[in-house]
Image (tube, rainbow, N blue to C red):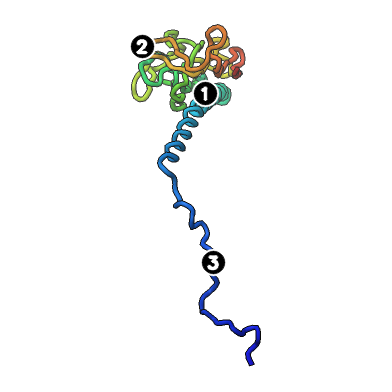
Amino acid sequence: MASPSNCGKRRSGRGPVRPRLFSSLRPAGFTLVELLAAMGIILTMVVLVAPAFTGISKGSALKAGGNTVSAMALLARQNSLSKNAMTAFVVLGAAGTDADYRAFSLFEITPHLDGTPAVTADWKQITEWKILADGVVADNCTFTASSVPMAPPFPTLQFRGTPVTAYQYAVFLPSGALTSQSPCHVRLAPGFFPPGSQTVRYTTAIGSGGAPANYYDISIVGATGYVKVDRP
């Protein structure tokens, strides 16, 4: 006998009916108006944020350049002490290149073992030219001008295969002191020299006395050759 609970029921062979969710919602995607509005918001944010990133980039380039130049000054002193040599720390001047006031290199001259005097041909470049990033220049440099002769004299310096005569230099003695016995320094700052001009145009705020508000000053003590760094 059939169970009463199954009386009057038929199996239809079909599963339970499920509700159709979201059947009344529109298709996924954005309308043209929504896309234009989103693009407008993004462009506005880019305009507002871009100057901040530009400032960060310039600051990073200045710091990187300052670290490089100060490290080269330290290396010049250490090279003189360790090799009993004279080491010249050279910065390119108005030489007519795209790296004017932005290129640095080291040169050395070691004494002859037989005691004979060193000559111009004994000067040797010991580092490649290190070039500051675009937008960072060497300003207010008190190194000795190339027009002042060195003993023994420097050879004609080469930059990218081209002879250059406009530069400034500071020479470390085997004792670590500078030949001039006077302090000297070079300041790095955001800016550039317009073509044909010897006056730097700063791209940073100007502080008191017309000096740049943001700079990296590398000083060398004449009597000891110690390197000091000054930043605002």
Element assignment for label 3: loop
How many discs appear? 3
Q: Along the line of sight, which residue is nearer the eye, 200 or 21?
A: 21
- In the rendered structure, which disc, 3 or 2, sits on the residue that comes first in sequence? 3
Instruction: Give the image location of residue 55, x and y in percent.
Output: 51, 24
Q: Which mark is residue 196?
A: 2
Amino acid at dot 3: Arg
Amino acid at dot 1: Leu
What crowding class fits label 1: few (fewer than 14 Cα within 10 Å), some (14-19), or many (20 or more)? many
Dot 3 corresponds to which residue? Answer: 18
Apparent side of residue 178 relative to residue 42 in the rendered image (left or right): right
Q: Residue furthest left?
A: 162
Amino acid at dot 2: Gly
Dot 1 corresponds to which residue? Answer: 62
Q: Residue at x 56, y 11 (%)?
A: 207
Q: CA distance from mark 3 to mark 2?
A: 82 Å
- In the rendered structure, which disc, 1 or 2, sits on the residue that comes first in sequence? 1
Instruction: Give the image location of residue 5, x and y in percent.
Output: 65, 83
